[in-house]
Image (cartoon, coloured by chain):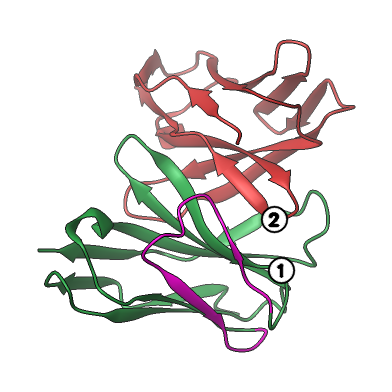
Amino acid sequence: SQKIEQNSEALNIQEGKTATLTCNYTNYSPAYLQWYRQDPGRGPVFLLLIRENEKEKRKERLKVTFDTTLKQSLFHITASQPADSATYLCALEENFNKFYFGSGTKLNVKP
Amino acid sequence: NAGVTQTPKFQVLKTGQSMTLQCAQDMNHNSMYWYRQDPGMGLRLIYYSASEGTTDKGEVPNGYNVSRLNKREFSLRLESAAPSQTSVYFCASRATGGDGYEQYFGPGTRLTVT
């Protein structure tokens, strides 16, 4: 089965800086990879999806890259704000409907 | 449009008791999922249902049963609760099951087994 690794240590950055979160996976490369945001006491909320043939995907201040050679996805938040503070999860679908999630990285953006 | 709803929000059980967690979605999604989330472990898939009438095991199905009652509802049953099942349970749904569709999550059920 897939194993997904995200940095379990919290990432602390200053407001206005760019946050970069890492997601590494084992085994075969998925057709796509997803990123979710989770606030305390709430369910995850979908942010972005990137397919294996896409090197980069952007949505407003968010950018995701996907390197199938390194088996890695990077998630960037530019001009970060305190409101971006949350836990960010990456996920992939191994077989139809069989999803695996990383344990998430907690981002703290300090004013 | 409520999205994905879950009941109850909180539950405390004694070891050996049984209970059913309820989940419903109003987005006409084909696929539905049950996850558990433990500290430091991330979300782990318990069971999923690709369509009404079908269910399949996920990564951690032991100790659980599910029912896809109709297209809207997907319930998770603990027949004999154990302390190891103390967790936060999330239900999710997805459109059509096709490649690349996002999952919509419910607010979660926090379950404690003593």
| Residue A104 rendering spot, x and y as whole percentages | 45, 32
Residue under the point 24% across and 65% down:
B111
Q: Amino acid at mark 2?
A: Asn
Per the image, label 1 sits on a secondary structure element best described as loop
Asked if residue B19 lies left or right of residue A70, the reply is: left
First to last magenta residue range = B54-71
Q: Measured along the vertical axis of the image, is residue A107 above or below residue B19? A: above
Residue under the point 41% across and 60% down:
B62
Residue under the point 41% across and 64% down:
B107
Q: Chain of mark 2?
A: A
Per the image, label 2 sits on a secondary structure element best described as loop
Looking at the rendered structure, which numbered label has been put on residue B2? none
| Residue A41 rendering spot, x and y as whole percentages | 32, 54
Question: Is disc 2 surrounded by few (<14), some (14 to 19) or many (20+) residues within 10 Å?
Answer: many
Q: Measured along the vertical axis of the image, is residue A97 above or below residue B16? A: above
Task: Considering the whole magenta stretch, tell me its main secondary structure.
Answer: loop
| Residue B4 rendering spot, x and y as whole percentages | 53, 72
Q: Disc 2, disc 1: CB below 8 Å?
A: yes
Rounded to the nearest whole Å, what is the CA distance between mark 2 and mark 1? 7 Å
Residue that sits furthest to the bottom in the current view: B70
Looking at the rendered structure, which numbered label has been put on residue B50? 1
Asked if residue A99 lies left or right of residue A68, the reply is: left
Asked if residue B74 lies left or right of residue A105, the reply is: right
Looking at the rendered structure, which numbered label has been put on residue A97? 2
Could you say which is closer to the camera, residue A91 or residue A59?
A91
Q: Quadrant of residue B17?
A: bottom left
Q: Which chain is red?
A: A
- Quarter of the picture containing the C terminus of chain B is bottom left
Q: Colour of chain B?
A: green
- Quarter of the picture containing the N terminus of chain B is bottom right
Q: Amino acid at mark 1?
A: Ala
| Residue B40 rendering spot, x and y as whole percentages | 33, 34
